[in-house]
């Protein structure tokens, strides 16, 4: 019931990066299975960017499209996986354990390829809390809050990425934040069906 989307569902989010914002529309594709895994592929369109607080000049102008996010589930939990893989990637990030409770913590290991094709280790640590009430343009939701810190070392210099997700039952992700050394990106649910 916390799986982010079911086939054919649409979500719209308000995406904010620094002092710029835009609308993102995500549509879930087919649900499939690969061995012990279930997955759903999500396609997204990003619309015209504008300054925070301003209205876009052409709100229906698409500036980018992507078909590259997969959500996976197995006996251990829910993962997000970059790319167009039809099986879980080795660098998939577990964003919600299958057996969860408030104040749960976990750690995962994974591997990534460096620019020369060598395998490099990575680690992730997560923490779950809640319930948390979240207010979005689409309404108010009781959520569970997940924080995951991921450390990868693809070039000999560790890179720290921080993810936060707020999951509402039967809706999925209503708020998310991604942060690395260069930028902070946030998304708030603005419409769903």
Image (cartoon, rainbow, N blue to C red):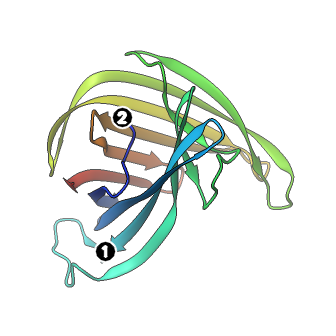
Left or right: where does residue 67 sit relative to residue 109?
left
Name the side, left or right, on which 130 lies relative to 122. Answer: left
Q: CA distance from mark 2 to mark 1?
A: 30 Å
Quick one: 151 or 19, which is closer to the camera? 151
Residue 20 in picture, x, y percent from top left: 31, 67
Tell me whether the residue at label 2 lies in contact with that at label 1, contact meaning CB atoms closer than 8 angstroms: no
The answer, for residue 93, to whether it is visible in the render is: yes
For label 2, the SS is: loop
Q: Is residue 86 left or right of residue 95?
A: right
* Sequence-first disc among 2 and 1: 2
Per the rendering, the mark at residue 181 is none
- Of circles 2 and 1, which is in front? 2
Mark 2 lies on residue: 2
Quadrant of the drawing holding the C terminus: bottom left
Q: Position of residue 107 (x, y in %)?
A: 61, 24
Mark 2 residue crowding within 10 angstroms, few (<14) / some (14–19) / many (20+)? some
Identified at 57% across, 26% down, the residue is: 76
Query: Residue sitting at 67 percent across and 45 percent down?
Result: 91
Identify the residue shown where x is 30% and y is 22%. 130
Residue 26 picture quarter: bottom left
Dividing the picture into quadrants, the one containing residue 75 is: top right
Judge whether 133 appears above or below 135 on screen: above
With respect to residue 108, does 20 lie above or below?
below
Q: Secondary structure at mark 1?
A: loop
The residue closer to the viewer here, 58 or 170, is 170
Q: Which residue is mark 1?
A: 49
**Pointer 1 local density, CA inside 10 Å: few below 14, some 14–19, many at least 20:** many
Regarding residue 18, the answer to whether it shows in the image is no
Closest to the observer: 44 or 108?
44
């Amino acid at each position: 019931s916390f799986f982010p989307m079911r086939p054919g569902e649409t979500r719209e989010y308000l995406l904010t990066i620094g002092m710029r914002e835009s609308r993102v529309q995500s549509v879930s594709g087919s649900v499939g299975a690969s061995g012990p895994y279930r997955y759903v592929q999500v396609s997204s369109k990003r619309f015209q960017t504008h300054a925070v607080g301003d209205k876009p000049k052409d709100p229906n102008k698409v500036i980018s499209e992507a078909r590259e996010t997969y959500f996976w589930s197995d006996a251990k939990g829910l993962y997000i996986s970059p790319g167009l893989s039809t099986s879980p990637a080795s660098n998939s990030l577990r964003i919600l354990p299958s057996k969860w409770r408030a104040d749960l913590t976990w750690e995962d290991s994974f591997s990534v390829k460096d620019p020369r094709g060598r395998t490099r280790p990575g680690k992730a640590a997560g923490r779950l809390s809640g319930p948390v009430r979240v207010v979005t343009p689409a309404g108010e939701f009781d959520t569970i809050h997940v924080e995951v810190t991921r450390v990868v070392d693809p070039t000999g210099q560790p890179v720290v990425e921080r993810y936060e997700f707020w999951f509402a039952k039967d809706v999925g992700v209503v708020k998310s934040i991604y942060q690395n050394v260069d930028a902070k990106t946030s998304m708030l649910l603005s419409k769903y069906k």
